[in-house]
């Protein structure tokens, strides 16, 4: 269909003058490309006027409005929607004159650039057998749930030890229809998983992590739910905001790389208590439950809990490093470091002297080397004696 023809039809539909033939042609235009429906819906939604104005704030609206009235022989509307029509007319004239360039740019999806280091880490993870997770669909669990519903109904899996109902509900961000095709990925204590979402966003799940996401994102938003730890490399899409929902609040993404970790996800009798966000690149906004959005800058960490939101500067290197296959410890207590490593390699730690726990180590260690190689490296760097018997290591 010619641009001029579809533009005329759109104008008649928006003004309420469309014939049955117009409606049929518009339907066929929608079916030709799903982005056509997005374009029309954004023009028709009055709540999107501000967004449209932001995109075209440099356009001479008055001049375009007069041109629109003259071109289509329309009279000046006297209703409260006059300003809306001015912006809609500007958009349509630009669509005709520019071949829809603004629209294509606005809805353009730009996948993240995956570095060679990340690609290598993904390869090593697969080769070492660490790339593994349980993947299931939520449809059966949701069939008996009526909207509005709490997301805890699908993430907690009837875990009687935890009650998240007051802290973790999403009654409007994810529709039941979306979740009926949503997938839930869960990693075990010694595994990780890389997943590419519908828009090209790459998410790296650490061990003991759960991610829920729609198989296909909607036309206006991109929502995911996270418990545990994950590194996000988000695709740029100006028309659909990417939001990560956590028990303590939401993370609104404006094209970026960042790390998210919820504290107390697995095996914590007290439930979830804190979420940490570290921004590596770009910009994110953090909105605590019942709070206001707080913008973050690269190199900052935001800790959100039920009562407060604290932002501080932090070294992002350890977070980038774990994403690319390296454990980084900088003057770290030995007990803390070995807690991380014992999860990853699946061994128990026995300290033959309690004071050893307070020893501090510094070093970068490859995540994908054999356990004995890692233990030898730690022994050499710290001066400690480490002995391994099956899945237990003894330290003195």
Image (tube, helix red, strand yellow):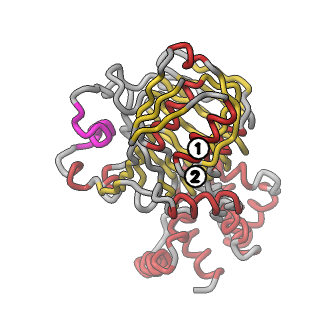
In the image, residue 129 above or below residue 315: below
Mark 1 falls on what kind of element?
Answer: helix
Q: Is residue 16 visible?
A: yes
Percent across and percent down for residue 207 are 45, 43
Secondary structure mostly seen in the magenta stretch? loop
Left or right: where does residue 387 sit relative to residue 301?
left
Q: Per the image, is 383 magenta?
A: no
The tag on residue 369 is 2
Is 207 displayed left or right of 297 in the figure? Answer: left
**Residue 259: which quarter of the image?**
top right
Q: Where does label 1 land, which residue?
A: 374
Q: Secondary structure at mark 2?
A: loop
**Which of the image's four quarters has the N terminus?**
bottom right
**Image height of 109 relative to 51, above or below:** below
Near-viewer residue (327 or 187): 327
* Quarter where residue 24 is shown: bottom left
């Amino acid at each position: 269909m010619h641009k001029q023809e579809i533009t005329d039809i759109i104008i008649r539909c928006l003004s309420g003058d469309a014939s049955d033939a117009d409606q049929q042609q518009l339907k066929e235009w929608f079916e030709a490309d799903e982005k056509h429906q997005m374009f029309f819906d954004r023009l028709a939604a009055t709540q999107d006027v501000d967004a449209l104005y932001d995109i075209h704030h440099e356009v001479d609206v008055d001049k375009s409005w007069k041109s629109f009235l003259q071109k289509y022989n329309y009279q000046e509307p006297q209703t409260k929607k006059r300003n809306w029509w001015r912006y809609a007319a500007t958009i349509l004239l630009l669509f005709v004159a520019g071949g829809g360039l603004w629209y294509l740019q606005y809805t353009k999806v730009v996948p993240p650039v995956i570095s060679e280091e990340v690609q290598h880490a993904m390869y090593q993870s697969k080769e070492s057998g660490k790339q593994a997770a349980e993947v299931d669909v939520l449809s059966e669990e949701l069939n008996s749930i009526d909207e509005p519903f709490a997301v805890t109904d699908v993430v907690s899996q009837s875990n009687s030890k935890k009650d998240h109902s007051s802290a973790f509900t999403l009654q409007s961000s994810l529709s039941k229809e979306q979740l009926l095709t949503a997938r839930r990925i869960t990693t075990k204590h010694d595994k990780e998983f890389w997943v590419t979402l519908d828009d090209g966003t790459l998410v790296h799940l650490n061990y003991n992590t759960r991610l829920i996401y729609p198989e296909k994102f909607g036309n206006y938003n991109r929502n995911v739910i996270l418990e545990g730890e994950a590194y996000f490399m988000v695709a740029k899409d100006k028309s659909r905001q990417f939001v990560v929902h956590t028990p303590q609040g939401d993370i609104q993404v404006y094209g970026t790389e960042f790390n998210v970790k919820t504290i107390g996800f697995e095996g914590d009798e007290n439930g979830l208590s804190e979420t940490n966000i570290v921004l590596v690149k770009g910009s994110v906004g953090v909105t605590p439950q019942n709070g206001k959005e707080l913008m973050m800058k690269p190199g900052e960490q935001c800790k959100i809990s039920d009562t407060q939101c604290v932002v501080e500067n932090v070294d992002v290197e350890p977070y980038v490093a774990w994403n690319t296959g390296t454990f980084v410890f900088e003057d770290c207590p030995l007990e803390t470091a070995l807690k991380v490593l014992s999860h990853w390699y699946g061994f128990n730690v026995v300290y033959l002297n309690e004071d050893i726990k307070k020893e501090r180590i510094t070093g970068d260690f490859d995540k994908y080397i054999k356990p004995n190689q890692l233990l030898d490296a730690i022994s050499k760097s710290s001066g400690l004696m480490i002995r391994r018997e099956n899945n237990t290591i003894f330290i003195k």
